[in-house]
Image (cartoon, rainbow, N blue to C red):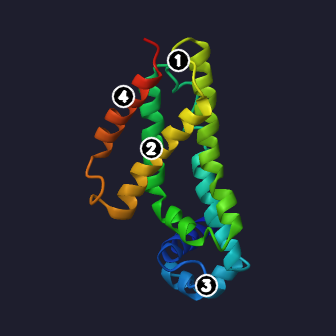
């Protein structure tokens, strides 16, 4: 039960802070949204900042999980692996879009949000750099600037998520599966050795 109460508070905070921002959300509102008393909230968290820290930790731990990119999932088939990375990224971002919105709203005000929320992109970058370096060693891709390639791949995925997230289908009416299939195919074509 104690963990369930904590999760209710964290989920309430994510919902309210993503809508109103950190400063405009009160602990009283968080408690009410969670269906708890404010006193119960303060038994679990000292203050609103501690709740925000828990929100951020929950977000980064969810992505950091080993289940996302294990060696068992890597096939060393460029299109298959890049499609898996894209799908994992898009699913994760979609599941956590309220936290992403909160991060965009608060990144200028709370440096710890910006710093902590770069953990996931850095993990993805490291995975992709290591993966493409191995692919290059195996002779499966061209000699290239892997850092630039990884940055391009990541921004392509972030761009799709942002277009969906910010404007719905108004900018990008391409379904996720079609985006992944076609963008990865084009991307891989530019990297594969002929």
Residues marked 2 and 4 touching at CB (< 8 Å): no
Residue of label 1: 142
Residue of label 2: 156
Left or right for 51, reference 15:
right
Residue of label 4: 185
Q: Residues within 10 Å of mark 1 (few under 14, many from 20)?
A: some
Q: Nearer the viewer, residue 43 or 188?
A: 188
Q: Which sits earlier in the primary sequence, circle 4 or circle 1?
A: 1
Residue of label 3: 27
Report helix, strand or loop for mark 4: helix
Circle 4 or circle 1, nearest the eye: 1
Q: Residue furthest right?
A: 46
Q: Which sits earlier in the primary sequence, circle 2 or circle 4?
A: 2
Circle 1 or circle 3, nearest the eye: 1
Q: CA distance from mark 2 to mark 4?
A: 13 Å
Report helix, strand or loop for mark 3: helix
Q: Which sits earlier in the primary sequence, circle 2 or circle 1?
A: 1
- State the image coordinates of residue 60 (x, y, percent, origin top left): 62, 54
Q: CA distance from mark 3 to mark 2?
A: 38 Å
- State the image coordinates of residue 6 (x, y, percent, origin top left): 61, 69
């Amino acid at each position: 039960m104690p963990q369930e109460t904590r999760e209710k508070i964290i989920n309430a905070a994510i919902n309210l802070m993503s809508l109103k921002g950190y400063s405009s959300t009160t602990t009283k509102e968080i408690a009410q949204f969670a269906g708890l008393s404010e006193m119960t909230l303060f038994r679990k968290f000292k203050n609103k900042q501690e709740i925000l820290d828990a929100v951020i930790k929950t977000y980064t731990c969810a992505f950091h999980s080993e289940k996302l990119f294990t060696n068992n999932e890597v096939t060393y088939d460029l299109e298959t692996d890049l499609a898996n990375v894209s799908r994992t990224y898009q699913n994760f971002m979609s599941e956590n879009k309220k936290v992403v919105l909160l991060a965009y709203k608060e990144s200028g005000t709370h440096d710890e949000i910006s710093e902590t929320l770069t953990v996931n992109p850095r993990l993805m970058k490291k995975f992709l750099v290591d993966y493409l370096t191995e692919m290059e060693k195996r002779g499966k891709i061209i000699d290239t600037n892997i850092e630039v390639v990884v940055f391009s791949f990541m921004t392509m995925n972030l761009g799709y998520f942002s277009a969906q997230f910010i404007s719905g289908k108004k900018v990008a009416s391409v379904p996720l599966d079609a985006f992944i299939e076609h963008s990865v195919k084009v991307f891989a074509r530019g990297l594969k050795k002929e």
